[in-house]
Image: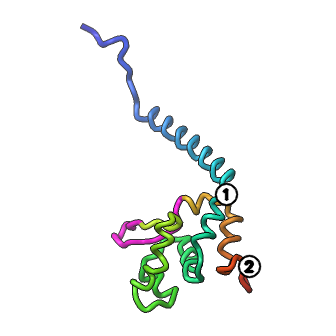
Amino acid sequence: MGPKRDALEVKSGSIEAELIEIKERLGSLETIASLSNSGVVLDYARKHVTSEQRLAIMRICEVPQTKEQLRVALNQNSPQAVDIHLKPLRDADLIHQRTNDGGLLTFEWSKLFKSLPKSSRGSLLREDRNGRQAKGRK
């Protein structure tokens, strides 16, 4: 008895190529969605960035930061003091918590916040807590 005629042979190279194509299509759809919803997301972010400390966290967390790095940057006395400002941003899905390769807990911009166009993120991060462009920030 020979091999089945309707059997499908799948090579890992072809699966990988299809996965790459799917990821590219998904990325394009996410880009379109983020551009069309950027005003709503920006208003949502403004609604949750209501203090200078939260704004500072958003500015700092463009790159992953540990809680200790945030504590030092915000000039706070304890990690718990950082949590007071960090928790609402995490709850609003503006900041994500991850564990880095070294096993340390880090905080960085969420996918939602990263989906905003660069100019919109920059505009928000240059504002003071009242929505005005902060002095010395262009």
The correct choice, above or below, for 31 with respect to 93 in the image is above
Q: Specify whether 89 is left or right of 131.
A: left
Residue beneath the point at 53% across and 59% down? 111
Residue 101 placed where, x, y %? Answer: 37, 66
Residue beneath the point at 60% across and 57% down? 115
Residue sitting nearer the eye, 136 or 131: 131
Residue 123 placed where, x, y %? Answer: 71, 70
Q: Specify whether 1 is left or right of 138.
A: left
The correct choice, above or below, for 17 with respect to 97 in the image is above
User: Which callout, 1 or 2, points at the residue further toward the start of the chain?
Assistant: 1
Residue 136 placed where, x, y %? Answer: 73, 85
> Which secondary structure lies at badge 2?
loop
Residue type at mark 2 is Gln
Residue at mark 1 to residue at mark 2: CA–CA distance: 19 Å
Residue type at mark 1 is Ser
Q: Specify whether 8 is left or right of 24.
A: left
The answer to which quarter of the image holds residue 105 is bottom left
Circle 1 residue: 38
Circle 2 residue: 133
**Quadrant assignment for the N terminus:** top left
Mark 2 burial class by Cα count in 10 Å: few <14, some 14-19, many 20+: some
Residue beneath the point at 35% across and 70% down? 102
Q: Which residues are magenta?
A: 98-111
Residue sitting nearer the eye, 62 or 93: 93
The magenta stretch spans residue 125:
no
**Quadrant assignment for the C terminus:** bottom right
Q: Which numbered disc covers residue 136?
A: none
Mark 1 burial class by Cα count in 10 Å: few <14, some 14-19, many 20+: some
Residue sitting nearer the eye, 95 or 99: 95
> Which secondary structure lies at badge 1?
helix
